[in-house]
Structure formats: C-alpha cells, structure tokens
Image (cartoon, rainbow, N blue to C red):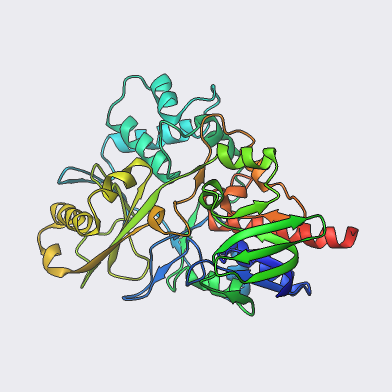
Amino acid sequence: MDAGVVVIGAGAAGLAAAQRLEASGHDVVVLEASGRIGGRVRTDFRRGAVELGAEYVHGNNATTWQIIRSAGLKTLPFEVTAERPRRFARGRRLEAVDWPAAPRIEEIVDEMERYAGPDVSLRAAFHRLHPEGGPAVDFALQRLARIEAADPDDLSARELARERALNTAGWDNARFPGGYSQVIDVLARGLKIALNTPVAHVRWTSGGATVTAVDGRTWRAGEVVLSVPLSILQRGLIAFDPVLPARKLDGISRLRMGQAAKVALWFREPVWPSFSYLGADSRVPGWWRAAESTALVGLMGGPETLRVRALGESRVIEDALDDVCGWFGNHARGAFIEGVVTDWTAEPYILGGYSYTPVGGAGAREALAEALPPLYFAGEACSTNGHVGTVHGAIETGWRAANAILAHGKLA
C-alpha cells in the first residue's frame, strides 16, 4: 500500500501531525497498535466522564485551547477556594488547609522548581537544601516526584527546574466535564486510522520509507512520523533498517519513562466535604473529585506505582476505600459502587506514564526530537520547550513534525 505520510501512533501527537498534514493536501494513514485512539488519554463514561489517563489542561496558554475554542468544547476551571480548600490526611485524620505545614510545602516546591545547583537527583537536592527533613519536606518531595511520575533518586533536579523555567503555558488548570476524549475525537476527525496495527519494522532511505506491520502488511511512504511512547523506542519494539544513528539512540537511552497509575472510586452520592485536592500519606497519595461525576480519582507516580502494582487491583481498591472511610466516615462504604485501577506501565503499547529527565539527561530531548528525513519524531518526550508530560506538549510536537515535513517538501 502507498501513502504520502505514515504516522505511527494515534495518540495526541500523531493525530495532531496527521490532521495538519491531511489539511495541507497530503495522503496520510495512521497506524495504531492498540484497538483505540487517544494514547494516554482515556475517558471512562460509565457514570459521567472520569479520566483514567490525562485529565487537565495545564495553563491558560496551553496549545490545547486552540482546539477547545475552535470546537466549542466546555471546560471547568480547577480552582482552590475557601469553599474548596486543599486538604491533607495523615493516617485517618483529615487536616484542613490551615495545617501549619501546608504553606511550607508550597514554599519548598516553589524553591525546588527554581533550583540552580549541580546536576543531582531530586532527593539529593532536597537533602542539600533541607537537611532537617520533616513532614513538609517529605510531602514536597513526594509531590514533585509524583507530578513527574519519576523516581526521586533518578530525576534531575536541575533539569526539572530548567523545564519549569521554559514552560510558557502557565499553571492554571482546567478540565472537561464531557471528557478529555473530546479533544482526541476532534483531532481524529476525517483521518484514515488502522487500529490493531502494531508496527514491527521501518526501512528508510533518503528517498522514503517502507513500514511493515506485525501482521506483514506494508506501507510505502515519502515520510514517516514516529509518535510512539518513549518506552517503545527504548525497548526496541520497532526495528529500523538502517539502525538509527548514535546521537538518536543516545537521546532515547538517556531519558526515562516514568511510571503512573490512577484509581477511580465511584459512589452513589458524594460522601466527602468540599475540597479541591487531598494529599495523603497513604498508598494512593493524591486525590481529587471528578469534574462531573460522583467519583474520587487518585494518582500514583514513580515508585508509588511499583508498590501498588505488587498488591493487585482489588487490594488497591479495598485499601483506597478504607482510607476514604477513615477520612470521611464509614457511610462511604455503603455508598460505594465500584472502582478501577489503570496502571499505564502495564499497557502493552504504552508501557509507562510519561517521560522525565534523569541526572545526566541534559540535551537528550533535543536529540530525540531531531528529524532524520524521511523520519520525523513526535510525542511528549520530544518536547523541548518545557511542556513535557502534557497533552499540549504532545500536540505541539505533532504540529512541529508536520510543519517540518511541509517545509521539507517545499525545499525538495
């Protein structure tokens, strides 16, 4: 089969690239290994919209807003107010936002996001700056590692601060009452997408490429956009002939694919007082309410994910429900309907949460993102402007790859 461009991966980056190329007159086919589109965006609609993957639009300047406004999608701001405060739970005790350590946590997080010291791990940087330790230091360290889906003994404190400084999207958050999958549906509109089509091999020359699926089908294309997760490249699940050059392989190997999982608990009615975010010293340490559903959503990132994976889904749900009953009262158990755990590292064609930069990883993203015509690379791990680990960062890299193909065609 022939196509002008083959896009490998139907996540946000691949769909964004395909849509822009299709709109510019290119014949595009998208090959998706799994049976659905969206990548790490997955909305569960069993009782309202609950996000099992990406959930927030991070920042008022995020590229996603271009799609939201053009499609007329409804969003809700994620606000922390006096009526919806942050809360903290230690053991079975729920603390109001005025827990004395709460302001200190924010100060420490802000300080670490401006870190300018040597290239050491996040934990080592915390020890350097806060050798006294204490609950606020522990919460701040866990929070940053969780947000990055990273191992704090591996995550580069200096690169974390550099990426924060590069970020131009802003820090206000919004959500979709109708589900994040709406954005994916807009990006996919009108595209030719082959589901259940994992790619096994890409043969490339300066004149084009041949893409071979696991089932033996082949596509000949002038250009290929590789928008698969970093983990797929790191594990060599797609073979390249000739092999990718050393600089590209170095960029791939020096990044890390973080681990992330979410748990959702559905209840017949709200069993909790109003709150925006709940931090807890429990197996599932970060909680919030779903946008428009009587569900609580919890996030685990980095080593936390490994610990809960060993327990299994039913035990994680039961432990999480025990915590909820401890914080809000035993009536929560009577109102409980069901729960689900989504471990993104266990997803066979994703194998992780999102990327982070370890100690010694400076420059790796730039190497990964560099085009090798006819090969172009996209995905959140290819973000070089600080928008790593986000849907809008992925979309930007998809548009960047498409623009590079369009520019290359004009120069040819």
The spot of residue 171 in percent (x, y) is 51, 49
Residue at the extreme front of the image, as rendered: 216
Give the quadrant of residue 179.
Answer: bottom left
Q: Quadrant of the N terminus?
A: bottom right
The spot of residue 54 in percent (x, y) is 45, 59
- The relative height of residue 287 versus residue 146 in the rendered view (above or below) is below
- Residue at the location (55% across, 68% down)? 32
- Residue at the location (56% across, 36% down)? 254
Nearer the observer, 174 or 138: 138
The spot of residue 259 in percent (x, y) is 41, 47
Q: Is residue 333 visible?
A: yes
268 displayed left or right of 110: left
Give the quadrant of residue 378.
Answer: bottom right
Nearer the observer, 247 or 239: 239
Q: Quadrant of the C terminus?
A: bottom right
Residue at the extreme bottom of the image, as rendered: 190
273 displayed left or right of 393: left
